[in-house]
Image: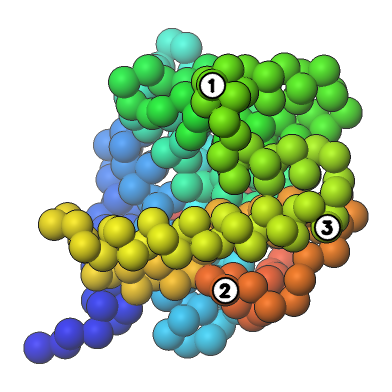
């Protein structure tokens, strides 16, 4: 019996992916099916990096995660609404996956099609505002009034006590290299503390810890966004391996997510 959680993660998410893709092939796919595909590709991308040291496959699978999310959003037209939980911006794993892979084009299109309001009952407004701001900054970086409006709303939500997520977004908007680097280090420490707490929870998942707990995809996405704004980021960052930062692959066709 195998006990390596990374190997098990690769096996289990490969199975989930194939099952979901089969549903797509049979015309039985729902928004939840596409969300499963997006998340499976993201986890399998991390597996490719950590198990096989395959940076190109890492980037390729993250791109596919983003493409699956884009398909979900396009499919969730007003006449064919998806479940609110699936549409929630803070539950969107594909946007940061595409961004982390360096696929700014797909990430921008995801931002263009994403909801601009939070889903009450399914996500916290502050979580929504963090990802919404990143999408705004990528999709409409010159609309500074809208960006400031989002930050002002965020300040009201946290009652004037900004978190590190707010701070790092502000430094990105201001293109403040030194402040961004400091905020990123603080964000990584926050992530590490969250992981320590998660490992003590009853619902702790070893497979997710062996993947998402070892490579901070959202942090890598922030690094990519910082680079796109001309900022230099420290070379050594915990949870954001240098190999992941250097990962790249050729552009993929929009339907690439349909094949593993």
**Viewer-proximal residue among 88 and 234:** 234
Closer to the observer: label 1 or label 3? 1
Q: Which residue is mark 3?
A: 178
Q: Earlier in the sequence, mark 1 or mark 2?
A: 1
Q: What's the residue at 59%, 45% (across, down)?
A: 164
Q: Residues within 10 Å of mark 3 (few under 14, many from 20)?
A: some
Q: Which residue is mark 1?
A: 159
> In the image, residue 2 lies at what x, y percent?
16, 87
**Secondary-structure class at tag 2:** loop
> In the image, residue 228 lies at what x, y percent?
83, 52
**Viewer-proximal residue among 74 and 222:** 222
Q: Earlier in the sequence, mark 1 or mark 3?
A: 1
In the displayed structure image, the side of residue 221 where residue 84 appears, left or right: left
Q: CA distance from mark 2 to mark 3?
A: 18 Å
Q: Earlier in the sequence, mark 2 or mark 3?
A: 3
Quadrant in the picture for the N terminus: bottom left
Q: What's the residue at 68%, 25% (across, down)?
A: 151
């Amino acid at each position: 019996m195998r006990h390596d959680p990374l190997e098990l993660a690769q096996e289990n998410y490969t199975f989930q992916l194939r099952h979901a893709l089969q549903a797509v092939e049979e015309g039985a796919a729902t928004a939840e099916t596409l969300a499963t595909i997006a998340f499976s590709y993201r986890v399998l991308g991390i597996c490719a990096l950590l198990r096989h040291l395959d940076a190109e496959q890492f980037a390729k699978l993250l791109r596919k995660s983003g493409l699956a999310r884009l398909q979900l959003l396009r499919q969730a037209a007003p006449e064919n609404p998806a479940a609110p939980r699936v549409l929630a911006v803070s539950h969107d794993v594909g946007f940061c996956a595409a961004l982390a892979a360096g696929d700014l084009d797909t990430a921008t299109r995801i931002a263009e099609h994403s909801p601009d309001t939070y889903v009450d009952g399914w996500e916290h407004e502050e979580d929504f505002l963090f990802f919404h701001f990143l999408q705004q900054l990528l999709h409409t970086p010159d609309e500074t009034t809208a960006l400031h409006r989002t930050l002002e709303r965020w300040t009201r939500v946290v009652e004037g006590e900004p978190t590190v997520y707010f701070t790092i977004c502000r430094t990105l908007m201001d293109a403040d290299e030194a402040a961004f680097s400091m905020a990123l280090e603080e964000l990584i420490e926050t992530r590490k503390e969250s992981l320590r707490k998660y490992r003590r929870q009853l619902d702790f998942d070893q497979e997710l810890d062996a993947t998402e707990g070892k490579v901070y995809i959202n942090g890598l996405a922030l690094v990519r966004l910082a680079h796109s704004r001309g900022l230099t980021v420290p070379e050594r960052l915990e949870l954001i391996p240098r190999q992941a930062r250097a990962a790249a692959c050729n552009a993929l066709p929009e339907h690439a997510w349909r094949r593993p």
